[in-house]
Image (cartoon, rainbow, N blue to C red):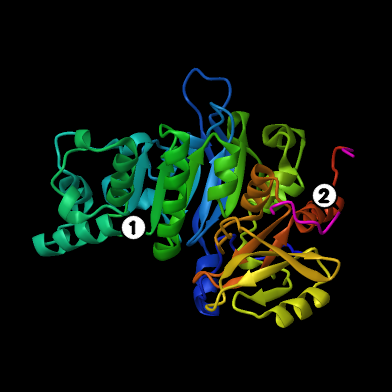
Amino acid sequence: MLEKMTNGSKRGDGGRTAGEQQDEDRAMIRLEALTKRYPGQRQAAVEELDLEIPAGRIVTFVGPSGCGKTTTMKLINRLIEPTSGRIHLDGRDVTEVAPHVLRRNIGYTIQQGGLFPHRTVADNIATVPRLLGWDRERIAARVDELLDLVGLAPQTYRRRYPKQLSGGQQQRVGVARALGGDPQVMLMDEPFGAIDPLNREALQNEFLRIQAEVRKTIVFVTHDIDEAVKMGDRIAIFGDGGVVHQYDTPERILADPADDFVSDFIGAGASVRRLSLTPLGALPVPDWPTVGDSAGGEERAAAARRAGHGHLMVLDDDGRPAGWLRVEDGAPGERLPLLTPLGPDATLFDALDRMLAANSSALAVVDGDGGYRGVVTMDAVRELINSTAAHAPRPHGSGGSDALQEV
């Protein structure tokens, strides 16, 4: 049986020390009774909002249009001034800091990157470092460092202009510019919203890779619950008037919606969405009977008798999955091909999707070096879904075979 990952960020804690973990659990941003009312409007844009955003984590703000999520984000760096309430950044009230000084220490990126069209890529990334008074050599080194970080070769891209870049490349440069001054906090307003689905997923994955390295405190605004679940260590679900209906981990929100609004906003398919939160690298993947690719006839026959399954996993001399060997009446049968194994970053959702697409009920799982770890089966995924569904609260009254079909 596959066991559900139960604690920590869904992207892992990267081997950080207890002291580093405790440092990240402190509140980097704290909102106290934050309110924003516009003249002539009966309803507040944000109403008495209390929220703590932990250091080194991504918190996604999600909700319908006009719910106050972008307004809240802009209040944090004082692009909009609050009507009342307090905003603390790393323990300091931001009203005590000049707005332009505050913003130089907060990274900010929007849809399509918001790049200056008349400036080169290097000049865009250098915007905040120049305002901070960095010297030329330090700025040049920082530009190249960040271009490498976002996957753009400095020698190729530093002298290009935004119009010479694709939408995905512009967004990568926008992220690099937001990181330019090495801020503690980044604010991201639907940064991937204008990107096509294929490139959007690639950018999401790339950004999560970058975050694993830089560990910034990030407020990420989106209208897409699937993006919120994928990107967020925690999710704040906003409703009308800037009211947060639920603020929790993606796992808990999907398993236990706080009210009807959250349940309706999440929609159907919460059990399947939970699979996307569980990387195979975090699971004790079940073992499977194996046999070496170079094994002789007697060794194969002995392995087949011990198998207890309809197939054996064939491993090459380096311990990598190489194929399946059919077992018939306790004897080895024909050799069968192998679907591409799943790596540690693949999720249970990826496993289910691959199985359904290939009409398979089992897939090999490998480690980061391609070495065999085990096999994930359709029965194991089904068992996990049933297990989590059985234990998930129902606040609103909502009420296998071992055969391998890959081969």
In the image, what residue occupies the spot 49% across and 48% down? 86
Question: Alpha-carbon distance for marks 1 and 2?
Answer: 41 Å
How far from the left and from the top, in percent, is residue 47? 58, 35
Q: Nearer the viewer, residue 161 or 350?
A: 350
Q: Which residue is mark 2?
A: 389
Q: Is residue 404 found inside the magenta-colored segment of the image? A: yes
Q: Amino acid at mark 1?
A: Pro
Q: Label 1's element?
A: loop
Say few, some or many: other residues with alpha carbon within 10 Å of mark 1 (under 14 / 14 to 19 / 20 or more). some
Which quarter shows the C terminus?
bottom right
Q: In the image as oriented, which residue stretches furthest toward the left?
A: 136
How far from the left and from the top, in percent, is residue 254? 71, 46
Marker disc for residue 209:
none
Q: Which residue is mark 1?
A: 183
Q: Is residue 264 found inside the magenta-colored segment of the image? A: no
In the image, is residue 72 above or below residue 382?
above
Q: In the image as oriented, which residue stretches furthest toward the top?
A: 40
Q: In the image as oriented, which residue stretches furthest toward the front?
A: 297
Q: Tell me, yes or no, if residue 116 can be seen here.
A: no
Q: Nearer the viewer, residue 210 or 106?
A: 210
Left or right for 402, reference 196: right
Magenta-drawn segment: 397-407
Please identify, in this view, whether the residue under mark 1 or under mark 2 is nearer the observer.
2
In the image, is residue 407 above or below residue 257?
below
In the image, what residue occupies the spot 54% across and 26% down? 65
How far from the left and from the top, in percent, is residue 393? 84, 49
Q: Amino acid at mark 2?
A: Ala
